[in-house]
Image (cartoon, rainbow, N blue to C red):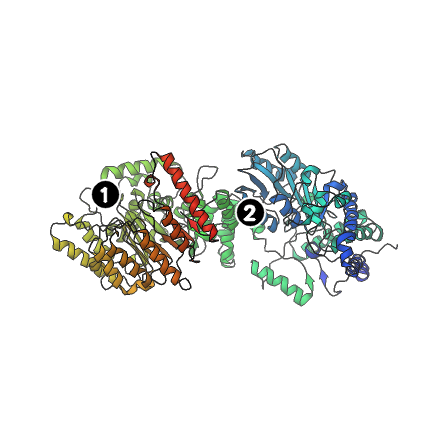
Amino acid sequence: MTKIEFGEKTRLDHYLMDQELVYVNHGSYGPCPRFVYDELQRIRLLQEGNPDHWFRSLKYTLYADCVRAAANRLDCNFEQITLVDNATVGVNALIKSSLPTSRPISNGTILCTNLAYGSVLFTIEEAAKQRGWKVRMINIRHPIENKQSFIQQFQDELNKGDVENIRLAVIDHITSATAILLPIVELTDLLHSYKIPVLVDGAHGPGQAVPHFSLNKLTCDYYVGTFHKWMYAARGCSFLFIRNTEVANQVQPANTSWGYRPSALQLDAMTHFHLQFFHQGTRDESALFTLPKAIEFADQLAGGFDEIYQYNSTLSQEAKTLLEQRWNTQGKDIVPKDMQAPYLKMIQLPDLEEYKKTEEDALRLLTDLIKDYKLVSIILHLRSLCIRKLISNEKYLISCLQQKSILLSTPGNIFYSIGQEAIFMNEYQIIEILIAYWPLNHLEIYRLLPLSSLLVYINNNQQQDDEIDSIAKFLEKKLPDGSTLLDYIVMGLVNKHKDLSLLKIVDFHRCSTTIQMTKELFRLPLLWIAPERRSLLQKRMYIEKTKLEKYIEGFNYVYQYYDKSIAHETNFEPIKIILDCQIINEDSLVGLELQQLTPFRFHFRKLWINNYVRQILTSHTSFDINLVLNLTNVDNITHLHLSDTNMETTENELTLLVRSLSNLRNLRVLCLQRVLNLYPHRYTAPHILTNLCTDFNRLLRRLIYLRRLDLSYSYLQSYIRILFSGLIQPLEYLNLQDCRLVSKDLEFLLSMRNLRYFKELNLSMNNFGTRTCANLILQIIPRCPELTILSIGYCSLQASAIGQLADYYIKEKNHTKISLLSFKSIIPYYNYEFDILLQKFGQIKTLKKLLLFPQLHTYPGVNDDERELVARELYRRCCQTLQTLNRQDLELL
């Protein structure tokens, strides 16, 4: 067999690619040689000649031969290696399998780096989510000075402790996007010293890392690699190596097929490990069988991997040097030479006038090169790598932010990218600097957060909260130095550069609903004021004097360290801070009242006010929300939640409340929980109560954008007609829970024209035990065709009335949208009544959640243990009833 001549002649004679292409993306989808491709076609023809013989017999013999060829080539035992379609298949199998370990199954952790391949990170994320594990990511800092400093980053992470729960560490041999050759032997030894199993993602390793690749010389526990990238096999030929053969036979592939329980005849030819991954149903495995020809091509036609390695590594380095000289980008490597991949090279492009440094333009440049020049390459917007030079050097970052020419030519999203990368790399001081010099008018805090870190945080903490709360908690998470990300944001705002920063609006939308978030932000004005002047700020304050003095004293003590690094009372342009606000303590009122003396202006979309504020006001001050509303722009407020837990709201305060609310003309959501208590004995004369209700009615009618109204836990008996008369807004939500409603109130609700818009209705905890009330309820519900959630629990309704309600929904089952229904009773219904109700409600396919069980203390029994047994038995019976209806999807509570 004649040895081929490297270079252009090899391409012409031995490859099938378009000869006009300049193809420099062999790492992603490199073409296989004609010699191997011909073998692929021969195998497919052989398969089509007698498919039955192929699938039942011949392919097993060929597969065993190919596995042996792989074991010989990679220097390992036949039982330790199996062939798979691609590296992703192997990685998924290992990460998602229950690998034997001495560590506990629960509370596990997977260790990885931010350099890992995208699909590998997705696999780790999904596996952790399914098992309730944590993901611990090492954020590799660039540039890397030398190999030892790189290893030290792993050591630093392990020194943080909590390594006993790490079930698996995943590292790359050669990183895909950044072409870094990792010191996997040293890293494996380090991780093994902590008894951490190691998986190496070696998609680019075999055929490139070293001329003679040996798995026996490595010490890692698992290795996943490919033959189709750098070892010339057809695409779809990779391998999975597991050092411990007992473990190998326990690993489960993603697909469970006939290899799960193979025949004795098949096990004579190969192991359970092989068959699990090979016998995966009917598919085309032809690419796997090209491995012997690929080895033959490399050894005999190309002269062996010594010559291939020498030629490829020299050629790629010469090309890198040539391009860097032509583009004047020498000396900008992010890793030392001994950590650069032999074949894959990363080269920084020069500045291009027609292409900005964005992901969109990187893709456009890639497309244009293919279209106009037939150049096939990989062009990445490695913003994280460009940015790491900025975040690793504070002085360099500040110098860049001080040059207007740089700022004017830089796309706005780059500054968010700098922030994201800084957080990703745990360089939080960069956030403070970046915000202090923020070169844009608008800053959206949500866009500063790296999505990957946020997802890892949510998964690690198994958050069940909505996205907004999760983001807020990410901002408030304690960092190793005891501070939070929010602290750095606050310090950046209070130290805003008066000449260079253009910041005018800071938007905390989507991340500012928590109490802690509100407290921290409202401390900005007091933090901006010099410490020696804070105690002199008691004039025009509504807060009780001794409480204010105590608050300021505590504030100065807590912030004495921060005060040293703040340029107090620097007069920069005002900053509008947009947030959802919870006003419950001194921080809120102090911040609001002092804002006019400082550059900060607070604007709210959603506002929560708790009656705790009453306790910190001066004795002569009434609980009036105008104290808050007068200090902000009320036109921005769309949600108001006011609660009075102790029901202390007085006649005068209710009058003030009506006047205050009349200013909120853009309200969409109004919640007055435990506020509107119309007890006759509280008022000096009956006409005052009537006048108050009339005033509230005028108010509600003026709120033309109102869509959600909550008056729960208020005494509204016999006043619904006055309160709701003339209300025509398309209300979607109405909550009248525990409002002491009676039949005349229900009669008026029945007459309301906007019932047809209701999507959620809560009438629970009202006494509707009379036949009249039950009939009115049964008339109201059909007038709410859009209803998805209905709560009529603890209303003393008989089971027969609930059954009639179910009959209505069954009749309208093709039109109803009801998904949640609560009809909890004060005491349990009889068992046969539960059976009848479930038989009926089980027929409503839209219904997904049913709340029907009362409190435990209402069940029969002499003690809680007996009552719990009765409750459990009832729950079992109900579940059994739903099972007979094939409604296991219906959740019972």
Kind of residue at badge 1: Leu
Nearest the eye: 538 or 758: 758
Position of residue 445 measured from the top left corner of the image (x, y, whole percent): 44, 51
Residue occupying the far left of the picture: 685
Q: Nearer the N terminus, badge 2 or badge 1? A: 2
Residue 335 located left or right of residue 446: right
Q: Looking at the image, can residue 503 be seen? A: no
Position of residue 323 measured from the top left corner of the image (x, y, whole percent): 69, 56
Q: Which residue is drawn at 54% across and 34% down?
A: 162
Residue wearing tag 2? 125
Kind of residue at badge 2: Glu
Residue occupying the far front of the picture: 832
Residue wearing tag 1? 617
From what the image shows, is residue 865 above or below residue 742?
above
Nearest the eye: 50 or 240: 50
Please name which of the two marks, 2 or 1, marks the residue nearer to the observer.
2
Residue 239 located left or right of residue 628: right
